[in-house]
Amino acid sequence: MRKTSADSRRWLVLLAVMLAFLPVVLDMTILHVAVPTLTQSLGASSTEVLWIIDIYPLVMAGLLVPMGTLADKVGHRRLLLTGLVVFGAASGLAAFAPDARMLIGARLVLALGGAMIMPCVLGIIRRAFEDDAERAMALGLWGTVGAAGAAIGPLIGGALLEHFWWGSVFLINVPVMLVVAPASALLLPRAEPAGTGRWAFGQALLLILGMIATVYAIKAGFGAKQPLPVVALVLLFGLAMLGFFARLQLRSRQPMLDLSLFARPAILAGMIMALVATGALAGVELTLAQELQYVLGKTPIEAGLFMIPIMAAAACGGPVAGRLSGLFGLRLVAGLSLLVSALALAALAFTDFGRPGVLVPGLLALLGLMLSIGLTASSIAIMGAVEAERAGAAGSLEATGYELGTGLGITLFGVFMSAVFSHTIVLPPDLAPALAETAARSIGDTYLVARQLPPGEAQGLIDAGRQAFTATHSVLLTTAAALIGALSLLVLAMLKSYRPVSGGHG
């Protein structure tokens, strides 16, 4: 009877943390389909749009390691519940932001709440499930909820935009939190081990500043076309902060980030998989949402419906990955999932989204399923390579990989898209130089400029933008396919001698 009670308690704990994780995932994808509407409503530039989208995952990535170590000290339950409150409040602020800059600030606070939630979720799962097979199943179910939340995100966003203003895509988080926070408070065990010692706020600040400055340099240099000396200075500052942070970790008796974990090939391979899979998924979704609305003229809800196959299939990937890993081994499942993802991306690069038939939904579903299997495989690799007492540190590393992958995916896809678009678009010869420079930055800027022109000239500019964006998205998907294909071979090599830590005390 005791064992049955303990078993059911573990699964109730899993239910609680999955409910807590759901709104964080919803917020990652619900905004993708809203980009065109948000851009036009706020008059946001292409650079502001990129910051609105990925300030959230990038700041969260900088905070996850510090929050993971903080969770180990103060307790996962306490930090999780605090994060849920912060996340709900920030969602309300974002919904009523009057301009792009205020929205970016609100998204930054959202990242703070999300960073409190994410490492706690994985840490609680690792502590609750000591058995390797049960842990793989639990992580698979967790991945399913994450993918399902991401799947319905674009659809919910499209439905809300059909009837309400753009801020509704943030406001929807508030009632969700009003349900999730009390449920988590009731289901999570109050008694849990907590660490001792001082939490190094200065080290956390170094990591955050270093990551944001480095990414900003990429954006400023290639996206916003800032002067080279400014870009070099910011990049140097960011790298110096990250270098100083790494040096402190190596010298500290109680480091915030245990760099020795990277000596384990399974953890390194898991981080690579997390970065690549989340980056590809976020970048493809953002590209697809803009292609569907700007080029094909679909409404937000039509775009959300079009994107269902990729996310619905991703929702099935968690349990499938857990099952396949048990049958064929983690190494084969991880490597092949990335390889098939690359083939699906390459095929999508040369298909006509205007005439999807069954081919495009099928390829999108295959891509979503394979990337989701890769993500779950990364969880199994990372969490299976550490002892239970180091679960918080490993969980924060994995969550950092997810968020950094999402942020870098959006950044690199966005910057690369902007560069290819500006070189591809053929602008009307009589367009004023200042307007031409703005219109060539992105498809969103093309539409903003077109609003200032007479109807005939506006349509000509829009047609040019649509042709350029279609060509751009083909180049983008082909490049992503080649990169993921190469990385699949690297993962196969790195997981060659993978063995999970049994019993949590290896």
Image (spheres, rainbow, N blue to C red):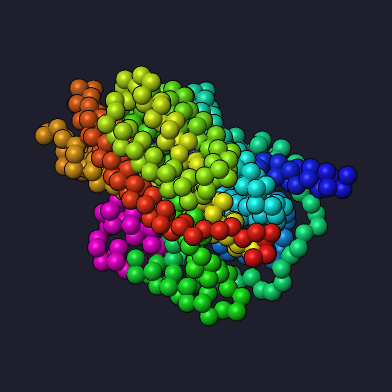
Specify whether residue 211 is painted magenta: no
Q: Residue furthest left?
A: 429
Residue at x-position 71% and y-position 41%: 15
Q: What is the span of residues highlighted in magenta in the rendered image? A: 213-234
Q: Position of residue 140 (x, y in %)?
A: 60, 42
| Residue 348 occupies quadrant | top left
Q: Is residue 382 above or below residue 445?
A: below
Res 31 seen here = no
| Residue toward you, 157 or 308 | 308
For the point 23% across and 34% down, the residue is 471
Frontmost residue, 141 versus 137: 137
Residue at (66, 35) in percent of width and height: 175
Report the residue at 32% width, 25% height from top. Answer: 353
Q: Residue 242 location, x and y as percent?
A: 44, 69
> Is any atom of residue 152 visible in this view?
yes
> Quick one: 423 or 253, which is closer to the camera?
253
Give coordinates of residue 79: x percent, y percent.
68, 56
Image quadrant in which the N terminus is located: top right
Position of residue 482 in the picture relative to residue 305 (left or right): left
Q: Quadrant of the C terminus?
A: bottom right
Quadrant of the rendered structure where residue 5 is? top right
Residue at the extreme right of the image, as rendered: 1
In this view, which residue lies farthest toward the front? 327
Quarter location, residue 383: bottom right
Q: Position of residue 442 (x, y in %)?
A: 29, 40
Q: How many marks?
A: 0
Q: Main secondary structure of the magenta part?
A: helix
Indicate whether 169 appears above or below 222. Answer: above
Q: Would residue 10 be found to the left or right of residue 373 on screen?
A: right
